[in-house]
Structures are given as C-alpha cells and as structure tokens.
Amino acid sequence: MGGDGRTAATGTITTKVPARLDRLPWSRWHWMIVVGLGTVWILDGLEVTVVGSVASRLSEDDSGLAITDAQVTGVAAALYVAGACTGALFFGRLTDRYGRKRLFLVTLSVYLAATALTALSFSAWWFFLFRFLTGFGIGGEYAAINSAIDELIPSRYRGRVDLVINGSYWLGAMGGALLSVVALDTDLFPPDIGWRLAFGLGVVLGLVVLLVRRHVPESPRWMLIHGRAPGAERLVDEVERGIVRARGRPLPEVTEVMTIHQRGVVGFGEIARTVFGGYPRRATLGLALFVGQAFLYNAITFGFGSILVRFFDIPSGTTGYYFAVIALGNFLGPLLLGRFFDTWGRRPMIAGTYILSGLLLFGTAALFGAGALDATTMTLCWCVVLFFASAGASSAYLTVSEIFPMETRAMSIAFFYAVGTAAGGISGPLVFAGLTGSGVVSEAVLAFCIGAGLMVAAGLVAVFFAVAAEGRSLESIATPLSLTEQPPPKIG
C-alpha cells in the first residue's frame, strides 16, 4: 500500500506516495484538478482585462465614477498588483502552514467579496481599495494553486499542464474583452451600469468555481510532512482504485521509497537560507523570469486600450474585439508549446520563448515608430509576440514551483511572484501609463523597448541557469528538507 511506517516516537515515515502519484496515468481525477484549480486564472484574466477595456468608459462624465483614464490604467492597476504581491506573501505563508486546500478556498472567497464590492464603487477611493483587495485574493491563489498543481500532477505531464493552466488566464482575458464590448454598448446598458455588470459576472463565475473546487483534495505530499500520512495513503489508494476500475488493468508496481521526518512549519529564516544559500542560481533565475515577463506584459496590456484609442482612433467601446485576438494568441502559446517543455526540455524552451518574444517586440516597436502599422497590424504583431511570451511567462510559475524543496514551495512561489511582479507590475503600470498615455509615438516605443529588453535579458539568464526538470519527480529536483539521511545540498 505504500508503507505508512510512522513511529510515534520519532515522527518518521517511510512511504511510496510521491512515486505512486508520479506513475499515475492521466485520468478523470486529474481533469477534476485541472478544472477546479485552473479556472482561477480565467477569473484573473477576466478581472484585469475588464478594467483595461472599460478604462476609457470609467473616465467619462456619465460613468457614475469620478476617475480619470490614467488613474484606472495607472493607479488602480498598480494597486491591484500591489494587492496581489501582498496577498501572495501573506497567503503563501499560510499555505505552507495550513495546507493547499484550505487556503485555495479562502483566497477565492476573498476575491469574490472584493470583486462584488468593486462593482458597487461610488468614488475613486472605493474603487482603488477593492481593486487592491481583489488583487490580494488573486495573489494568494497563485501560491496555493501552483503548489497543489505541481504536487498532484504526474511528473511527465507537469510542464504542459502547468503551462496550460497558467495560460488559461487568457481565456478569461478573451471573455473579458468580449464582455466589455457588450457591457459598454449604451444601447443595451446605461453608461453607469454596464461596467458594473462586467465586474458582477466575475462574481458569478467565481461562485461556480468555488463549488467545483470543494472537491479538489489536499496535496498528499503536504499531508505526509505535516503528520497526516495515513490520510495521504488513503487518498492515493482511492485514486488508484478508481483508475484501475476505469482502465480494467492494474497499475505497475512502485519500488521507489522515501523516508522523511515529519516536522512543523518551516520558519522564514530557514526558507531564506534554503532558497538563497542552497540554490543561488535558481533564485537568480526565478527573479529574472518574473521581472522580465511582468515588464513585457505591462508594456503592452495595461495601456492596450488607450494605445488603440489615442494612436489609431479606435472607439473605446470596440477595443475589446482587438484584445480578444491578442488573448487568443496568448492562450494558444502555452496550449501548443506546452508539451515541448516536457519533451525538448525546460532550458531550451524557457530561454527560447523569452528571447524570441523580446526580439519580436523590438521589431514591433520599430515598425510602430516608423508609422508602418495600423490598428489591425499592430494587434497582429502583439498577437505573435505574446504567443511566445505567454508560454514563457507561464513557465516562470512552473519554474519557481518545482525547483525548491517542498517545505518552501508555496512561500517560494509567493516570494518570487511578489518581488518580480512588484518590480514590473507596480512600477510598470505607473511608468507605462505615462509613456503610452502621452500620445507621443516615441514614448510608447520606449515603453515597448523596456519590456522587450528585460524579456531578452531574462532569457539569457535561463540559458545558463535553467534547471532540466522535465520528467523528474519534485523530490529529485530539490531534496525535501524533511528527508532523512540528507545528501549534500545542491548548490545552484
């Protein structure tokens, strides 16, 4: 059964649970995890895109909200990201302490409440406050959910599943873009009501996700370390029985055993020593990937609607159609390229998608600066850039969730997300809102070049520092701190 060899005196267990999880064939159980956990990125994409798409409408006199376009795309966007960074750190700590399942239910509830209150905004300060709190809930989701995904999905599928789930953000972005077209149609809804309904839809979708997510289990790997080995064994037994019934043949035997000493919560000091002392190259890689993708995306997406309106005279109510095209390209990137991260390998794919997307954005900036693009061709250029960038950005989450020891996983995800995204996601909107909102072509070109340069730089870091994690168990990529008879620590 996997050997629940726990002894009360030492708290030591010998188990096959990690190896049993990794050898499972793909099943309905895995699809349930994908649907239950992956849908939050759809909500995040819906949130960010709705705000970007309705920015011009919110700043109009009859919107019912006294706010400027720059405040929506600059201040509100920065506060949303600040909330996400804060929430990631706050909930990341709790996720390692209290478990993945408990926290991904709490964080979704925070998101739902804050989004509902955003729809009721009557002044700029209220709108800012609940954009921050919405981000606070979403940030917590990143740590809890990426931890659970990597710990539940078999190693040979982990790369592509993680990328597609993170890339599903853009399904929400596409839906948000099209939703904004309907919500901003004044023939259907009054100007002060349509944008509120757009936020309200996020609440409805979130409630559906909450119902589905209740059935997603706790991570057996987390349970093993936190004194719940019998529960972990029972869970894996149940999953295996279901797969055997569906397949009509037994699963192959597992011989790989690990012995761990169960422990409590890992302190911040030990996390810092482990991540930065034991894995300095990996820490550098994580920061570079998150900063690069955050700046590239902020260079394009937060000012997208304003760029179309100011430079190409596109009506504010129709920018959603253009963004839907970009969102489709973003989703197709992880969907079509994800499997190569498991077959060709992490290093060539991470480095390749980062560097190529940066170079393509440099090319787009040059064409835009020369006046060679219209709204349609500009959108198509962005679509191609983000096809590769989206796969790269999704791989940043995959990378930091699999290259550090399990006891530090959620907090590591939270830290790299918070630091990298704060650098690009808070300063980015503030800087890019001014550059893209000025109406000066050369300043918008500068915004694109900043994002492109940092993306290429991150790709070069990946050339040297990326870890060949494809097809490997999490325990072989980074030795758990709880493992008995520890091997010498890996440096890098």
Image (spheres, rainbow, N blue to C red):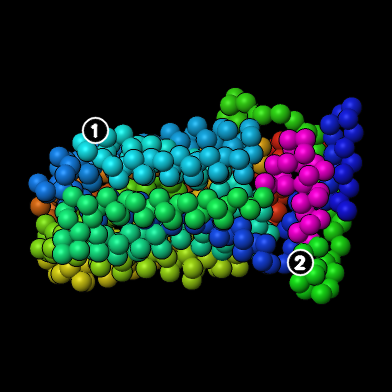
Q: Which residue is mark 1?
A: 125
**Dominant secondary structure, magenta:** helix
Q: Is residue 281 visible?
A: no
**Residue drawn at point x = 60 percent, y = 24 percent:** 269
One can see residue 474 in this view? yes
Q: Picture coordinates of residue 286 (x, y %)?
A: 50, 44
- Kindly identify the residue that appears in the image at 65 percent across and 29 percent down: 266
Amino acid type of the residue tagged 2 in the rendering: Ile
Quadrant of the rendering where the C terminus is positioned: top right
Does residue 223 appear to the left or right of 304 in the view shown?
right
Residue tagged by mark 2?
243
Camera-side residue of 87 and 57: 57
Query: In front: 96, or 200?
Result: 200
Describe residue 28's horizontal placement relative to residue 255 as left or right.
Answer: left
Residue 255 image offset from top left, x and y in percent = 87, 56
Q: Tell me which residue sits at (29%, 54%) in the image.
A: 197
State yes or no: residue 230 in magenta: yes
Is residue 356 shown above or below 476? below
Label 1 crowding class (10 Å Cα cut-off): few <14, some 14-19, many 20+? Answer: few
Tell me the element at label 1.
Answer: helix
* Sooner in the amino-acid sequence: mark 1 or mark 2: 1
Q: Are marks 1 and 2 in contact (CB under 8 Å)?
A: no
Q: Is residue 405 above or below residue 397?
A: above
Left or right position of 216 against 298? right
Q: Quadrant of residue 7?
A: top right
Bounds of the magenta segment: 218-240
Q: Is residue 306 above or below residue 84?
A: below
Q: Locate residue 210, reporting x and y percent.
A: 52, 50
Front residue of 477/169: it is: 169
